[in-house]
Amino acid sequence: MKLLAFILFLLIALMQYPLWFGKASWEKVWQVEQEVTAARENNLMLQNRNNMLEAEVNDLKQGLEAIEERARSDLGMTKQNEILFQIVKGAQP
């Protein structure tokens, strides 16, 4: 009887080995789940950035106000008969 119990225990242990130490062990499954979570967060961040860029492209295609705003802020352009005052903050001693 003891031999049968030992054999059954050994079979159960052999069946459990791949679950704990094999190719698809619990630890590796947990690591893959963490990688998937990180990839989803990264995808969400990139999707938000893409949406903002798409909105900006659509705005530039449709409206002259956005083009004017970009020219003023990025290139420092002004309209005709317009004076630009630029305030430069100096280093304080």
Image (cartoon, helix red, strand yellow):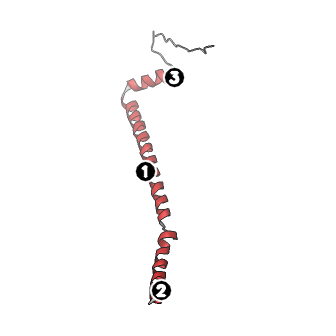
Q: Nearer the observer, disc 3 or disc 2?
A: 2
Tell me residue 92's x, y (percent): 60, 14
Could you tell me the amino acid type at mark 1? Arg
Q: 43 or 81, which is in the foreground?
A: 43
Could you tell me the amino acid type at mark 3? Leu
Tell me residue 83's x, y (percent): 48, 10
Relative vertical location of residue 58 with respect to residue 20 in this rendering, above or below: above
Separation (CA) of disc 1 from disc 2: 46 Å
Could you tell me the amino acid type at mark 2? Ile
User: Is there a contact, CB below 8 Å, between mark 1 and mark 3?
Assistant: no
Q: Residues within 10 Å of mark 3 (few under 14, many from 20)?
A: few
Tell me residue 76's x, y (percent): 51, 19
- Per the rendering, the mark at residue 7 is 2
Relative vertical location of residue 39 with respect to residue 77 in this rendering, above or below: below
Local secondary structure at mark 3: helix
Location of mark 1 (residue)? 40
Separation (CA) of disc 1 from disc 3: 37 Å
Q: Nearer the observer, disc 1 or disc 3?
A: 1
- Per the rendering, the mark at residue 75 is 3
Tell me residue 85's x, y (percent): 50, 11
Q: Residue at x 47, y 20 (%)?
A: 72
Relative vertical location of residue 13 with respect to residue 42 in this rendering, above or below: below
Q: Residue at x 51, y 22 (%)?
A: 75
Q: Residue at x 46, y 62 (%)?
A: 29
Q: How many marks?
A: 3
Q: Residue at x 44, y 52 (%)?
A: 37
Q: Which quadrant holds residue 80?
A: top left
